[in-house]
Image: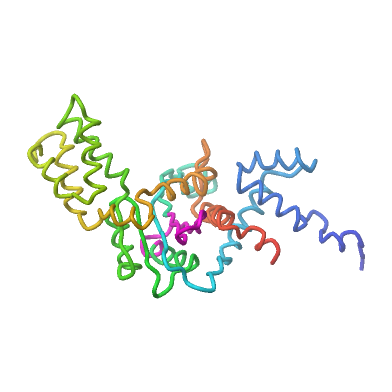
């Protein structure tokens, strides 16, 4: 039997990778393309590592880190702010046969990203999945629990008016709070209508309606839109679209109460999350992902955003 004292002390073996080196590979591989990550290892540590090794270790730890979750606070928070939205990433389905590159199918898949934080906190907890709406709904509630959701917590949801978002909010939090339409998303509908109703001064008209919305005078906004609604056969219907959008969602326009309580009226937090949690790594130019690999990378990105990175490497 051969005994190598240095290998034993350093935790390495022939043609192996120490835990410390695996962390470096995963760190760089979760931030840059695998090829660029290998270059960074060479630049910072003077170690030549194959791109395939960076990919292998990064994805391996991406799968393992999914078992780690944030610890909820000891006491549930009184007020929780939560959001969810979808972001598209490029997915590749390999072809059949000996050469998987031939006949591969390239498409776009929606990643559903959710966030939750206690009122007054500056950072949120995130969750991300490529799963269906049921999986996304479970993840949303689990993320809220990790952020401090309790039986008596009031929940403030904010986002666009996508039916699936409103439906899942009601399922998870409906009895504990309310859902608010993103004010800036609503303003886009008003801006499109303003160009038709008041073409010479569209900004002035839009700002007047925005002021009415902030004061919860939704009926006034609908009355301003009503006389200008296009017929159903019109090629474009910006005014009618704005009217229908607001009329169908009147229960989610309580901006006055949100502002009074210091709660956000826009979904900028989740939009920012799309950029720094998902898109920064998973939407690199020319990059396509296998679905399982994409989820592993999402696990790494979420763990880093949720400040679980050091805990994972300390416990393994």
Q: Is residue 101 above or below residue 23?
A: above
Query: How many numbered marks, from 0 up?
Result: 0
Residue 261's x, y, as percent? 36, 58
Magenta span contains residue 126: yes
Q: Is residue 105 left or right of residue 240?
A: right
Outermost residue, top side: 200
In this rendered view, identify the residue nearer to me: 28 or 57: 28
Q: Which residue is drawn at the image coordinates 77% and 57% (left, top)?
A: 18
Residue 156's x, y, as percent? 36, 60
Question: Which quadrant of the figure contains the C terminus?
Answer: bottom right
Q: Which residue is drawn at the image coordinates 29% and 52% (left, top)?
A: 181
Q: Is residue 279 above or below residue 125?
A: above
Residue 16's x, y, as percent? 78, 56
Colouring style: rainbow
Magenta span contains residue 54: no
In this rendered view, identify the residue nearer to me: 179 or 88: 179
Q: Is residue 205 left or right of residue 154?
A: left
Q: Which residues are magenta?
A: 113-136
Q: Which residue is drawn at the image coordinates 30% and 65% (left, top)?
A: 170
In this rendered view, identify the residue nearer to me: 258 or 26: 258
* Quarter of the image where one finds residue 304: bottom right
Question: Which quadrant of the figure contains the N terminus?
Answer: bottom right
Residue 204's x, y, as percent? 23, 31
Outermost residue, bottom side: 151
């Amino acid at each position: 039997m051969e005994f190598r004292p240095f290998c034993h002390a350093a935790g390495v073996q022939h043609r192996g990778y120490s835990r410390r080196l695996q962390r470096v590979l995963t760190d760089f591989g979760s931030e840059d393309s695998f090829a660029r990550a290998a270059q960074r290892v060479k630049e910072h540590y003077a170690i030549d590592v194959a791109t395939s090794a960076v990919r292998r270790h990064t994805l391996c730890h991406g799968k393992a880190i999914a078992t780690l979750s944030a610890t909820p606070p000891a006491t549930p928070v009184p007020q929780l702010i939560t959001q969810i939205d979808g972001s598209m990433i490029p997915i590749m389905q390999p072809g059949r046969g000996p050469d998987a590159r031939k006949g591969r199918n390239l498409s776009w898949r929606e990643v559903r990203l959710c966030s939750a934080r206690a009122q007054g906190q500056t950072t949120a907890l995130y969750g991300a999945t490529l799963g269906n709406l049921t999986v996304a709904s479970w993840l949303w509630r689990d993320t809220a629990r990790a952020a401090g959701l309790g039986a008596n917590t009031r929940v403030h949801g904010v986002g666009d008016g996508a039916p699936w978002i409103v439906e899942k909010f009601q399922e998870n939090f409906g009895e504990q709070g309310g859902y608010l339409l993103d004010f800036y998303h609503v303003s886009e509908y008003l801006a499109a209508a303003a160009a038709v109703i008041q073409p010479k001064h569209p900004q002035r008209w839009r700002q007047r309606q925005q002021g009415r919305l902030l004061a919860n005078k939704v009926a006034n906004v609908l009355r301003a839109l009503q006389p200008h609604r296009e017929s159903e056969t019109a090629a474009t219907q910006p005014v009618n679209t704005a009217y229908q959008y607001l009329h169908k969602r009147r229960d989610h326009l309580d901006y006055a109460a949100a502002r009074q309580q210091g709660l956000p009226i826009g979904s900028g937090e989740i939009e920012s999350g799309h950029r720094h949690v998902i898109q920064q790594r998973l939407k690199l130019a020319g990059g396509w992902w296998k679905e399982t690999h994409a989820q592993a990378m999402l696990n790494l990105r979420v763990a880093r955003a949720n400040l679980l990175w050091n805990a994972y490497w300390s416990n393994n």
